[in-house]
Image (cartoon, grey):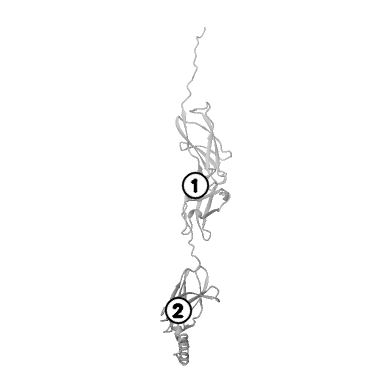
Amino acid sequence: METVTSSRRLFNCGSISSAFIGNFIQWQTSWVRYLMMVLGLVALERALGAEANLSWNDNSSNESGFRIERSSDGQSFSEIATVGVNTTTYFDTGLQSNTTYWYRVNAYNEFGESGYTNVVSLTTEPDINEPPTISAILDQSVKADSGPSGAISFTVGDPETDSSQLLLSASSSDESLIPISAIQLTNDQWGSSISFSPAPGQSGSSIITVYVTDGVNIVNETFQVSVEPVALFSMTDPSDGSEYYLGEAIELSPAFLGGVTPVKVSYFIDGTLVSESTQSPYSSVLQLPRTGTLQLQVVAELPGGGQLASDSMAIEVLGFRDPTNLVVSEALN
């Protein structure tokens, strides 16, 4: 027995009258018209990053489902999905960030389809780039003319970028004290650090700002560098080249690093003021007043009332020199 589809039997079987076929076609057309009439859809949209949440009103009772169409220019639409009967939402995921999309929806059944909803558009959010982070850096104090500082460690990080790939830079509020060229930054798989070299003959303070960027966002951290002037002094060697003796005179000559000029220089032995000088080169001659260990120190008074003290220097003072080479001879009458 021959097997045929229902459509062939409908149109090829002579037992079905042409009037019946015409009535069927008229009924089918009316059914599609009814579908289009009751399907007044409204599409609502909400953008969540790179996802579009669509919703609409289902005003028909005879749909088989809904077709969702999308456009990238608002003119040319293509179908991206279908959903079943009575479904009124669709989530369009995997969208490009910071991009505008247009949507429309229509209903369909086996006999045809409705018209479209209103066209809606949305622009997805840009990619959220979290800024990098940088830890606090402690303030630093160094001596004038002391050369490069040691490496000062700190920590950088970023949720999206490997920390070793972040870019670092720095600035100085006083480049005459801490030149930009004298700041060294490192950032690698072992960590991050900064070092600097104060300019020769300078003292004062400068604010150092360290910047960290992932190519989009920039953050910074500041710390203060204080460069302290230094007082030094030298003294004449012992007359015999090795030892100091009670009552000997020694000359002390001070030096000041960091570009400062004192208004007065005072000399102390064991904390007692023994001499002062107000004229450059501020040298002074001291007599060693007693035996034993003596602590020598220089204190400079600076313009504005500040003071600058040297480190103490200890010397050992011996008693009188013993007489030597005693000879005797018989006196002749």
Does residue 149 sit above or below 242 in this rendering?
A: below
Q: What SS does tag 2 mark?
A: strand
Q: In this picture, is 138 found above or below 70?
A: above
60 or 161, nearer to the observer: 60
**Between 194 and 82, the one nearer to me in the picture:** 82
Q: Which mark is residue 187?
A: none
Q: Which residue is mark 1?
A: 151
Q: Is residue 305 visible?
A: no
Quick one: SS at disc 1? loop
Q: Residue at x 43, y 76 (%)?
A: 83
Q: Residue 150: percent from the left, percent from the top?
A: 50, 45
Instruction: For the residues labelled 1 and 2, say whether their Cβ atoms are less than 8 Å apart.
Output: no
Question: Against 2, is 249 above or below?
Answer: above
The residue beneath circle 2 is 66
Whole-percent x and y of residue 57? Answer: 44, 81
Query: 196 or 275, which is in the foreground?
Result: 196
Q: Amino acid at mark 2?
A: Phe
